[in-house]
Amino acid sequence: MEVRSQRFRFSARDALGDPRLQSALGNIQHGFTERRRQALDALPEFEQLRAHGTAIRDHAIEHLDAYLERFEQQVDAAGGQVHWARDAAEACAAVAGICRAAGARTVTKGKSMATEEIGLNEHLEAEGFTPVETDLGEYILQLRGDTPSHIIAPAIHLKRDQIFEAFQAHHDPALSSHSDDHAELQAEARRVLRRRFFEADVGITGANFCIAETGSTVIVTNEGNGDLTQCLPRVHVVVAGIDKIVPTLEDTSTLLRLLARSATGQDITVYTTFSSGPRRADDLDGPDEFHVVLLDNGRSGMLGGELQPMLRCIRCGACMNHCPVYGAIGGHAYGWVYPGPMGAVLTPQMVGIERSADLPNASTFCGRCAEVCPVGIPLPDLMRYWREREYEGGHQPAAARWGLGLWARVAVRPRLYHALARLGARILGRLGHRRGRLARLPLAGGWTRGRDLPAPVGRTFTEQWRGRAR
Amino acid sequence: MSDAKPRIGLFVTCLVDLFRPRVGFAAVRLIEAAGGEVVVPEQTCCGQPAWNSGDRADARRLAARVIDAFADCDAVVVPSGSCAGTLRRHYPRLFDPGREPERHAQAEALAAKTFELLEFLADERGFVPEGVRFEGTVTYHDACAGLRELGVKQQPRRLLRRVAGLTLSESEGCEECCGFGGTFCVKYPEISTRMVEDKCGRLVASGADTVLAGDLGCLLNIAGRLSRAGHPLRARHVAEVLAGMADGPAIGEPRGG
């Protein structure tokens, strides 16, 4: 996926001025946030579950090498094959190679952020294959030539009439519905996708977890499209980040409980599917081949450093659902696959901080993301990690750097600081004396464009306190 | 409580010092009423703007000054969750326990004795406001750092319940960020303005006539947006009400006379 994170400021401004997007974003609050709250209210032991889940993830990451090897052995033993990919290009090449060997034309896909991350659809199209997204949201985006704006609800930025329009423009009129009624649109997508499921030669899914103990991959969906994607074609390819490793089945069940509640407020997602190798002799269905492409793409670079806690992430989306900045501008403004707080940490690691400089800065550090994270990732601290790298590298805007430097030099000189504070209080106090506030102030346009600046009273606390003490 | 009055260092905060000294004096009155002796060591800023901008060196320099200035206080009290959070949660992380064990230990010691004003009053001193009146309906905005870094939630409500004439009307989303975020509000003014717009809408919907909070940063942001949008809702630091000093002009109101 093309990186547009450099345009963050412009995209954010556009997003704020887009009434349709703003109305769509309103749904997050009453959908995800409220449902998560209800799910947690019904589970008093959530905190223990979270601590347990965090420990599981930490353990897996600390022993990642061993568990990855174990996973590969178990996939082999089940008759499947693991492909190691250092970066997006290697992962795309591996998948295309499998498709070519299978003589594939149509390739169905379950929702997978890892495949968005590596730009798989574009690569497959260039190689002459026809990838078809089967997750309803992803399918709509594919028709519109659009990109996901949320990691679990990729089309959350769209309203129903936009979906109706996309269907009208692309579907065989014989299969079309006649209104933008929710159920009718779903039925229409189902009619169209059903054919595609039967045509497909290869099915590609992501994985929520890769279980080292059994060599299984796990996906959760609410539509069942993942099951049809991986069971009907002759070949099933899983694309997953190396961080998806979980030691055991038991661990997986703990994490599934956390994931569903944190993501959608469900006790359990509607379909939870475990894939363990290709079809065996007495299986009723399943693919002939089972491949797992394990993707690094910057992940191993987080091991052993300050960003390591980010590898715990189970991609539930709770951080963005609760982020007031995401809530104001939506996911596209972040300019790449991963939006919101988790994206503000991951994107700089994967595409480079110089191309995503705004992301870790566009946070008030309100801390809500860390508060709701089911695996306790200290997201504001990790964003601050990137701010430090930017400061060290001189990537911050010159004005901000200069202003901060000047302020810091004054702040370590109390006499100078208080002299300037007294002066500032006098001037601002006089300017704002009549109304008690300032509607405009030179160099403070960022503040005063949207709000007044309450005026100081004229004498600082320090000044008054010293006067009183004497 | 021991016999000798504990020596309480007031960390005024730069915003209170410059914009609303009344909050500092309200804090002094409250700490004294709760049995403390107040001292105000020489101070400037806690260094949060540097720390949150990735400028660790300047943050360390300022932190070291604060640590030294308050070394002989029994406790440090801050009328801001955000600055208190910096002293308590962040200072110890600025000094490596391996390479600078002494500074680190000093930072830990400061962290252990630093309190946000309301938690100091309610939790440390078991303080109850006596004979304080405030006629009106208030709504309380939970400033982010106080709430999430320090767990300040029930303390202001417990204290406000003892103020005669005061009715508390909670607003929807009272725990949601107002969009101030320190340097965030000037770095991303459009996003910040949208956030404070949403916040103000909810505060107004609570039906209160005054919004209270424990952080002046949020209050300047909220008061500035309220007046720009023409809402009659007034904004005050909660310490002003608890100290019985809410008689003067609210934040952003003209001084009478």
Image: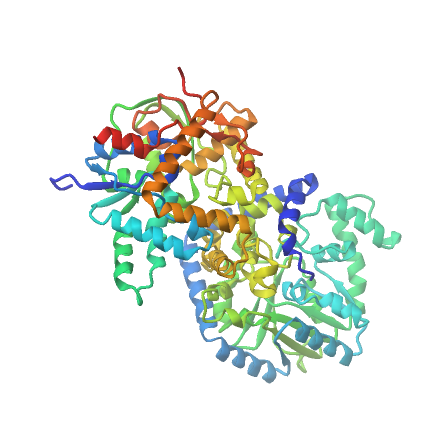
Establish if A211 lies above or below A224: below
Q: Position of residue A366 (x, y in %)?
A: 47, 47
Q: Quadrant of residue A31?
A: top right
Establish if B35 lies above or below A330: above
B221 left or right of B6? Answer: right
Q: Residue at x 53, y 25 (%)?
A: B231
| Residue farthest to the top, as pictured | B257
Q: Is residue B151 visible?
A: no
User: How has the structure been colored for display?
Assistant: rainbow
Counting every numbered tag in the picture gives 0
Establish if A80 lies above or below A157: below
User: Is A327 in front, or is A464?
Assistant: A464
User: Is A203 in front, or is A155?
Assistant: A155
Q: Quadrant of residue A469?
A: top left
A447 left or right of A290? Answer: left
Q: Position of residue A382 (x, y in %)?
A: 48, 59
Q: Is residue A377 visible?
A: yes
Q: Residue at x 29, y 55 (%)?
A: B107
A313 left or right of B121? Answer: right
Q: Position of residue B118 (x, y in %)?
A: 31, 38
User: Is A79 in front, or is A416?
Assistant: A416
Q: Quadrant of residue B201?
A: top right
Q: Position of residue A461 (x, y in %)?
A: 32, 33
Q: Residue at x 35, y 48 (%)?
A: A412
Q: Quadrant of the C terminus of chain B?
A: top left
Q: Quadrant of the N terminus of chain B?
A: top left
